[in-house]
Image (cartoon, grey):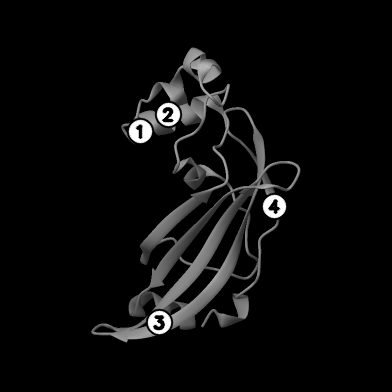
Amino acid sequence: MFEQYIGIRSMKVKNIVERGAVKKFALAIGDPHPIYLDEETGKQSRYKNNIAPPTFPRVFDYGVIEGLNLPNKGLIHGEQTYHYERPLFVDEEILCYSEIKDYYEKTGNNGKMGFLVLTSNGEDMQGNTIFTSKQVVIITEAVRKVLMV
């Protein structure tokens, strides 16, 4: 169903790790660690700056993969992992993009399910990888039927 999208990437989109957004995110996830919130703590840390929580990249814009039209409802978030080369620093600009890595199907009790494997990537402005995130989106039989129409 989505095999033709394997290997396709979105265009890179510039994002900023904004101080206010980092603060709101940290408080929303219940992690008010001073390394995220307090400027003095950031300056005195080994990073010499505040950093963002590990799951903060969830809020970034990764662009659009042309032709991939998934519904806003009915998908299941299967899993997500993050790998960091270094932390995200508050106030830095980064480039983000997504790529379809795989698609496969399995048959279960409720019919056929599709598994779409995507990576989300963040690079500094020089093109060095900061993080990668892998997620699996499960497309249920009910959603598959709607997409096939």
Q: Are marks 3 and 2 in contact (CB under 8 Å)?
A: no
Nearer-the-camera pick, 127 or 98: 127
The quarter of the picture where residue 88 lies is top right
Look at the picture and state if 79 lies above or below 147.
above
The quarter of the picture where residue 75 lies is bottom left
Number of numbered discs visible in the structure rendering: 4
Report the Cα–Cα distance between label 3 and label 4: 32 Å
Q: Is residue 18 left or right of residue 34?
A: right
Task: Look at label 2 and name its amino acid.
Answer: Lys
The disc placed on residue 28 is 1
User: Which residue is depicted at the point 64% across and 32% down?
Assistant: 92
Report the Cα–Cα distance between label 1 and label 3: 36 Å
Q: Nearer the viewer, mark 3 or mark 4?
A: 4
Which badge, 4 or 2, is on the more N-terminal residue? 4
Q: Which residue is mark 4?
A: 12
- Badge 4 marks a residue whose secondary structure is loop
Report the Cα–Cα distance between label 4 and label 1: 27 Å
Report the Cα–Cα distance between label 3 and label 2: 38 Å
Look at the picture and state if 75 lies above or below 86.
below
User: Which residue is depicted at the point 41% across and 21% down?
Assistant: 34
Q: Are marks 4 and 1 in contact (CB under 8 Å)?
A: no
Q: Are marks 1 and 2 in contact (CB under 8 Å)?
A: yes
Mark 3, other Cα within 10 Å: few <14 / some 14–19 / many ≥20 = few
Residue extending farthest left = 109
User: Which residue is depicted at the point 70% across and 47% down?
Assistant: 128
Which badge, 3 or 4, is on the more N-terminal residue? 4
- Residue 25 seen: yes
Q: Which residue is mark 3?
A: 145
Which badge, 1 or 3, is on the more N-terminal residue? 1
Which badge, 4 or 1, is on the more N-terminal residue? 4
Task: Look at label 4 and name its amino acid.
Answer: Lys
The disc placed on residue 24 is 2
